[in-house]
Structure formats: structure tokens, C-alpha cells
Amino acid sequence: AMVGLPAHHLPVWATVFIYFQLCDSVPDMCAGMGKAMRKLKCGEPELQEEKIYQDQSKQFESKHAGKMVQEHYADLPYPPFSFGDMAKEMSYYSGEVRVRPIFMQYGNSLDMLNHHLYRGNQTFADRFRVLIAGGGTGNSVCFMAEQLRNTNAEIVYLDFSPASLAIAQQRVSIRQVENVQFVLGSIEQLPALGLGKFDFVESTGVLHHLPNPQQGLQVLADSLQEEGGGNLMLYARFGRTGIYQMQELARLVNEEVYDRNTELENIFQLLRSMGSGVFAKKNVIRRFDFTLNKDSIFYDRILNPKLCSID
């Protein structure tokens, strides 16, 4: 009966009740943030729609670094590539063949490679062979395939993650290129795969995750033609100062933890509890290279079980 009365005719308890009801309806200030950033800035809220894609709790069989790296990239394809990303690419490439790739890699452009590796003498027209070692979700293989679309070049994609390979295959298919061979396997297995020699080898952010990075580097070098060359991205010692210290702290905190979700929650809680000082939360987050809008990025930066700098 009170609902229709003006506010000044309502008893105090009813006015307070209405006030709280209005406050409850205020939009979540954390809405729109990535899940990882919401956990850091806003505590524990999680958007309902994100739970649809949330995997069940991941239990590790052991804490052996080599095995955990394989499980990590099998469960969390990298770089992260969402349904929205796939839809955007499908829309961009629908209809006519696109001349300009939607995703560009300056370091892998043919002009750059020709200048720095082949002294301007490479035409890329005589069965040019490319190996993408640790191709992940397909950024490099897609860019190279599009650049070499109208040639007889052959591009070999190699990765041990079935989930990453499946994403890369779909992205290549969207681009309507047919010059890519997909191989499920690791860099260490390359000599036994019989894939032959290559004119160009590309490996971004892979060697430093191997049990023996030097062995992996030698395998890639041995896979090159005599006049071949490569493009490698490796983590350096000083460029990631702060991240390495955070990774070591994460290992101590999660030493007896065998569940990936618990690992993540422990680190989110650790970061939220950081105070002032040199090793403060804002200084640590600033060293994470780019936005932490996905758990997979956060896990790869801080909780990757095998990572070493290359001097």
C-alpha cells in the first residue's frame, strides 16, 4: 500500500529500504574489464557469461616443468584468440580475397627479410620454404601465408598443442590460402619428422620454454638451407626484470599446489595484498608487457612452469 505514496509520507525504514534497492541496481563499475583485471582491481566479481567458457579445475599430474609446459599450452592456447577475434577475421575475409592482411608483423615482412637475410636477392618465387616453429594460434603462419599466397612457397607450421593448431588451421582456412602444412609436434622432434631443409625459420617466444633451449636452437639451425636465415624472439635477462622475481615468488607460493585455478587465485590474492615500496603492485603490473585482460596471458607471464632468459 505504501508503494504509491510520496517519499515524504513514507516511514524512515521504507525510505532506507528504497535507497538500498536503488544502490543495488547501480551498474557494476568493473563490468567490461577483462576477468584478470577485475580480480586485481575489484576483488572477485565475475561476469556470468564468462562462466560459460570456463574449464573445469585443472589438476596437474606432477610438478615436472617439461610436462607442465605441454599441459599449459594444450589447455591455454597462446597467444589468446577468442570467439570474438575469430568472428572479426571471418567478417574481414568474407567475400573477395583481401590484399592487406588483418594482422601485420613488421619483422616478418618479405621486404625486411629480403633486406636483412638475403641481401635483396630473394624473389620468394622458387619454392621458398618456411618453418614456423611453435606456431601457437597462428599469427605468424597466417601472415607469411598471405604474403606468399601467389607463389609456389611452402609453409610448415609446427606446434605440440592440438588446441593451438586447431585455431591456426581455422584462421588459415578463413584466409583461403593453401600453401600451409600443419604438423603436430615439438622442436626437439624436428630431425625425426623428415620435413627437409628450410629457407626461413621463424620462432617467437618458444626456445626459452624448452627444457634445453640451446638444443632447440641447434635443431632449428640444422634445419636451415646453407643460405637460409631465421627470425627468433627470445626473453632477455634485464628486459624482464621484475617479471622474473614475480615468477620466483609465484613458485614459492604455489609449491604444493596442483590445480591451475588455485594457482591463479593465489597470485591474484598476492598482488591485491601488495603495499607500497619498490616491489609494489603497480610497479609489478607495469612490467607485464601488455594488458592482462585474459587469464591465459596472466598465466603465461607469471605462472609459466618453464622460462629462462637467453644471454
Image: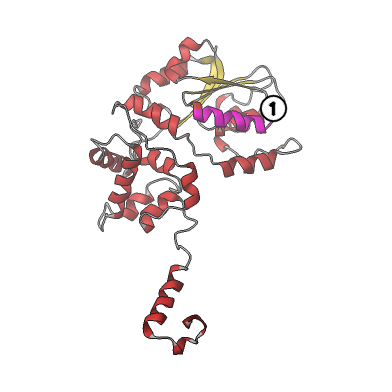
Residue 20, compared with residue 192, is above or below; it is below
Question: For residue 42: magenta?
Answer: no
Whether residue 168 sits left or right of residue 2 in the image: it is right
Quadrant containing the C terminus is top left
What amino acid is found at the position of numbered circle 1 in the picture?
Arg
Q: Which contiguous range is marked in magenta? A: 163-176
Whether residue 211 sits left or right of residue 151 in the image: it is left
Residue 7 position within the rendered picture, expressed as x and y whole percent measured from the top left: 47, 86
Residue 254 position within the rendered picture, expressed as x and y whole percent measured from the top left: 26, 39
Q: Which residue is mark 1?
A: 149
In this view, the residue farthest toward the right is 96
Task: Please name the colour scheme applied to the rendered image.
Answer: secondary structure
Question: For residue 173: magenta?
Answer: yes
In this view, the residue farthest toward the bottom is 9
- Residue 106 showing in the rendered view: yes
Q: Characterize the magenta stretch by its predominant secondary structure.
A: helix
Quarter-of-image position of residue 108: top right
Residue 156 position within the rendered picture, expressed as x and y whole percent measured from the top left: 57, 21
Residue 182, compared with residue 37, is above or below; it is above
Counting other residues with Cα less than 10 Å from the Cα at mark 1, is it few (<14), some (14-19), or many (20 or more)?
some
Whether residue 112 sits left or right of residue 126 in the image: it is left
Residue that appears at 35% across and 28% down? 68
Residue that appears at 53% across and 39% down? 81
Frontmost residue, 294 versus 108: 294
Frontmost residue, 103 versus 114: 103
